[in-house]
Amino acid sequence: MKEDFYDILGVSKSASAAEIKKAYRKKAVQFHPDKNPGDKTAEEKFKKAAEAYEILSDPDKKARYDQYGHQAFENGGAGGGFGGMNMDDIFSQFGDIFGGGGFGGFGGGSRGGARRVKGSNLRIRVKLTLEEIANGVEKKVKVKRKKQAKGTTYKTCSTCNGSGQVVKITNTILGRMQTAAPCNTCGGAGQQIDNRPSGADAQGLITDEETVSIQIPAGVQDGMQLKVSGKGNEAPGNGIAGDLLVAIEELDHENLQREGDNLHYDLYISISEAVLGASKEIDTVSGKVRIKVDEGVQSGKILRLRGKGIPSINGYGTGDLLVHVNVWTPQALTKEQKHFFESMKEDSHFTPSPEKSDKSFFEKVKDMFS
């Protein structure tokens, strides 16, 4: 089981953004590779701390993690971690937390100085049926993304000499102050385009269509966002590709209504079926099933089919299918049918006599939401 992000940073779920940032800085300094050369355990802890901070420092990602846990981010290629990233990738994203890319006096300049520019993210919307949400699905989508054109070459930036930063020294009443800012010429990449093939833009990139496979886990909800790392736009030079952000759109089902992990189904039966009982076929997300309706069933009765709902994305089991029984009252009767019901008006079998154990409509609604 994957370690809890809060435990990795040593903070509580109620920790503020400042406390999370402070905890990450402490862990990163403690397990920094330059401080622990050759120590694979320290390097792994450094990566885990960066992964935890990437999620917990973002309010939206933190909210999804608090609600759904790791499964909100880990779904094959749509994960949110650093499993496929190297140290430079982590430094490029979080180096500024230590000021100017340095880590407490070590590591700031030993990695060449230039930060790796990240390409822009792409966003798409994927429509899913209730059946796909219940079972999980692989979706293949065509995405137009920017890629480095073949034949594009880069050279060291003449402005920053490959450092990716421009250092300015200012004289103040407190003495000389040194500040560093990303190079405007190369955008902090430390490289400039040297040869640009025909059809490429000013950064040596072209737009290309690519088919991307997205593994969507069971239990996702409408509005949830997944991430496919590295499938956004590429960056020029030695930069890293952005991400593909996948927004989930849940399509309406013809007969089923979703409420969290539970599903609701309205079953309509005739008066005869209510009196005599019946066997009825209903829809579920795994196909049609046949259920038994007992004789004498009352309108408003709720039949619970356990485990026939939606799997929890957080791994907390599967919801139920709640079948709401509705007795259909006919509106047009023949003379013989009317005569039959007239003769039954005074019959004790047709006189309502609810037992104390029979719950009212409002009690049933209260039970559903309790």
Image (cartoon, rainbow, N blue to C red):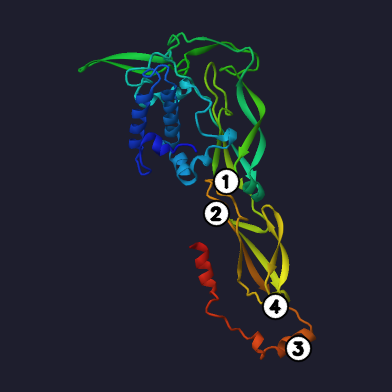
Q: How far apart are marks 2 and 4 (CA)?
A: 33 Å
| Residue that extends furthest to the left in the rendered view of this protein | 173
- Amino acid type assigned to the residue bearing label 3 in the image: His
Location of mark 2 (residue) = 260
Closest to the camera, between mark 2 and mark 3, is 2
Q: Distance between the residues labelled 2 and 1?
A: 10 Å
Q: How far apart are marks 2 and 3 (CA)?
A: 47 Å
Number of residues whose C-alpha sits closer than 10 Å to that of mark 2, classed few (under 14), some (14–19) or many (20 or more): few
Is the residue under label 4 in contact with that under label 2 (CB below 8 Å)?
no
What kind of element bears circle 4? helix
**Which of marks 1 and 2 precedes in the sequence?**
1
Q: Residue 275 carries which label?
A: 4
Number of residues whose C-alpha sits closer than 10 Å to that of mark 3, classed few (under 14), some (14–19) or many (20 or more): few
Q: Where is residue 343, by image quadrant? A: bottom right
Q: In this view, does 44 lie to the left or right of 210?
A: left
Number of residues whose C-alpha sits closer than 10 Å to that of mark 1, classed few (under 14), some (14–19) or many (20 or more): many
Location of mark 1 (residue) = 220
Q: Which mark is residue 287?
A: none
- Amino acid type assigned to the residue bearing label 1 in the image: Val
What kind of element bears circle 2? loop
